[in-house]
Amino acid sequence: MKVGIIGGGPGGAVTAATLVRLGHEAHIYESEVFPRFHIGESLLPCNMPIYEDLGISREAFRQQSYQPKTAAHFEHVASGRTVRFPFADGLAGDPASIFQVERSRFDKLLLDTAIANGAILHCPATVASVDLERLAIVHDRGADAYDFIVDASGRETLLGRQLGIVDRDGDLMRAAVFGHIADLPLAPGAEIGDISIAKADEGWCWQIPLEPRKWSIGLVLKRERVIKGGTPADVFRNNLAFFPQVRERLGGQVPDPTRSIPNISYRVRERIGPGYALLGDAGGFIDPIFSSGVLLATRAGWRLGRALHAGGPRMDLGAWKAETDHDLSTFVAFIKLWYDGHFVDNLFFAERRDPPIYQGIISLLAGNTTHPDNAFLALLKKRMARQNARTVGTSDVRRPTSDVKQPTTDIGQ
């Protein structure tokens, strides 16, 4: 089987690596020469089995000097409360650790792994469209036909825009400003290697340790604050007032350069069609509060490669779609709870914890969306069912706008 893949980020690279390791031919079309800057540096423990299946061991991560990540730490700005979720305290069978990564090097590692296993890279290559009748990728040097085409083009959502099926998410209309800084003291209650999230009424702030003297930091705010607030650096500087504890630890540092994304959430109405599939950010993007982007992309790519191997390019991908839909909808429901003040105050930052719920939250923070013993996941499913019942016949998405079609950069593909 010969598969064409648009995009060499984590989703595309893992799809290609999976296919070639199973004996198929995979061609990757990538417009940028790696390494290149990318945000979305905090991986989830449930990523690790996929990387190990592709031959990327924990030792390979350690050789890259990546920071081990054993917990997620959260800080409630208004009350000063903090909570730390060590992955080792989660449910049986869940991985207990992963790594924080600088995406420029990490994405190159995944792409190099695919190439080392036999994938063919076309780079730089600018893909203009997909000829769905011929199943061909149309690019700046011609057109190449394939048995199956995967759109892993990231926030460019190439095939989604071509088909007119990209919608802005009306429930999660937020934007982000972000970049790298030199140093940052640990938040109260955090330990070395933790991702730390500060929660305020106006938004939230991520702090991710990448190296001893390099941190990723970003603010996720209501969209109007970003698009009407001046330059990205101005937006970052002016909105730090909502995060006084973080501002104090920063000591006047502002990322240079400071980047922005004007709309961080959108949906793609359909991710499969005759001879093609969309995955990762090309198939929709959700708020990055729980660092789910790389997991969703790589898990979808790994599963897709195995599904195509088992059933061929004309197989019914309904089961693959159901799995990816489940992952996506579970994290969307979790994200909506994050923006629910009642949940944050009375469950997430609760002083007295219900052990099964606490363990269940950790399991989901680790990236496990299907653990059979997850009491929190069971509650989340009930909430999802109630919300679905209330929204039958209504729509919570908005039609595409220019900021969806032409993003400035990516988070977490």
Image (cartoon, rainbow, N blue to C red):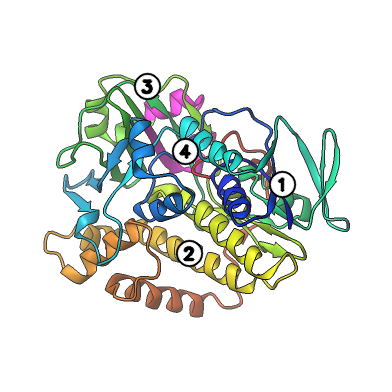
16 on left or right of 335: right
Q: On the image, which quarter does residue 398 sit in?
A: bottom right
**Picture coordinates of residue 48, whole percent (x, y):** 39, 51
Disc 2 secondary structure class? helix
Q: N-terminal of the two: label 4 or label 1?
A: 1
Name the residue nearer the viewer: 280 or 311: 311
Any part of residue 351 in sight: yes
Q: How many marks?
A: 4
Q: Which mark is residue 327?
A: 2
Q: N-terminal of the two: label 2 or label 4?
A: 4
Q: Which mark is residue 8?
A: none
Q: Amino acid at mark 4?
A: Ala
Q: Amino acid at mark 1?
A: Leu
Q: On the image, which quarter does residue 307 sit in?
A: bottom right
Magenta span includes 232: yes
Span colored in magenta: 216-238
- Packing grade of label 1 (10 A; few <14, some 14-19, many >=20) is many
58 on left or right of 88: right
Name the residue nearer the viewer: 191 or 115: 115
Q: Which mark is residue 254?
A: 3
Q: Amino acid at mark 2?
A: Asp
Task: Name the residue at 17% across, 60% down.
Answer: 350
Q: Which residue is mark 4?
A: 176
Residue 127 position (above or below residue 14) = above
**Picture coordinates of residue 242, whole percent (x, y):** 31, 37
Q: On the image, which quarter does residue 206 sit in?
A: top left
Q: Which residue is mark 1?
A: 158
Magenta span includes 240: no
Disc 3 secondary structure class? loop
